[in-house]
Image: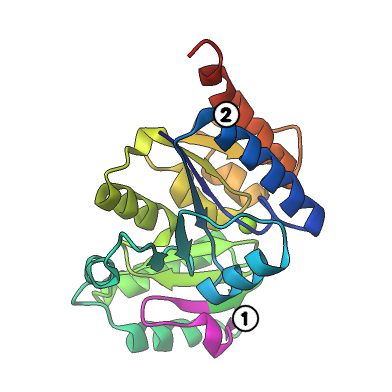
Amino acid sequence: MNILSTDIDGTIFESATDAEIFAAGWAELSGSLGNTILIYNTGRSAESVKELIGSTALPSPNLLICDVGTTIYSNKINETDWQTHLIPPQWDRSRIDDIVINWSPDIERQPARCQSEAKISFYWHDAALESRENLSQKLSKESLPHQLIYSSNKDFDILPPNGGKGGALQWACESLGYSVSDVVVAGDSGNDSAMFNLLGVQRIVPANAHEDLLLAIKDQPTYTASGACASGVIEGLQHFWQDSCVGH
Ligand SMILES: [Mg+2]
């Protein structure tokens, strides 16, 4: 089985042209390989992904992981099972929100549409690693389970420990009987690192990837594409998958 779990923005989509490049490349690969599974793993909401698919050439995925690995959409997945796995009994959204918003005047809440029970989202521009680590220690001292995700030097999400693009992908693979070693991941920024750090996956970064992702995955063997965005992802997929087309 050939499974791609890819971020959307900056990875396969920046413009209509990227969407066309990805769609054409994906159609060709899945046509020649058969047995391909496409997973979008994005910070966007499901609604926003559906709008994007409706207005660009991007193909519909087999599985959709949205809201930075806090929601999973597939007719083969029971959303209640996922939410039970995701949200621990000690999860205290309002206390975390309260502590974080008072942590620094530079932290600002994202709009209500970006928030959910399992996703507390802020903007925090140029947040130093040390300051984020201190905040994490404070939450731990208060016995508040959490996971901090910082991306694109501004997006600051707090999720339950089992969430995130990596946790959601792993849980979905287990639930659907997919082997993580059949998965290729692609992404361009910090919130993608959780996918890249799953044991056994193969990894693609397009040429335009942000420094925060590159630093977080520096010890992981990764295919660094010469192409940017969608052309880089297709280039990486050809690298990992094309060999298996030959002679089989
Ligand atoms: Mg991205």
Q: Label 2 vs label 1: CA separation? A: 50 Å
Question: Which of disc 1 and disc 2 is earlier in sequence?
Answer: 2
Does the residue tagged 1 have its C-beta within 8 Å of any atom of ligand 1? no
Residue displayed at 68% across by 39% down: 25
Would residue 167 appear left or right of 210 to someone viewing this image? Answer: left
Residue displayed at 18% across by 76% down: 89
Q: Residue furthest left?
A: 89
- Residue 186, image x, y percentages: 57, 44
Please rate how many residues cluster around mark 2, counting C-alpha atoms within 10 Å: few if below 14, some from 14 to 19, many from 20: few
Q: Secondary structure at mark 2?
A: helix
Is residue 156 visible in this depiction of the protein?
Answer: yes
Which disc is residue 106 wearing? 1
**Label 2 sits on residue:** 32
Residue type of the residue flagged with mark 1: Asp
Q: How many marks?
A: 2
- Residue 21, image x, y percentages: 75, 45
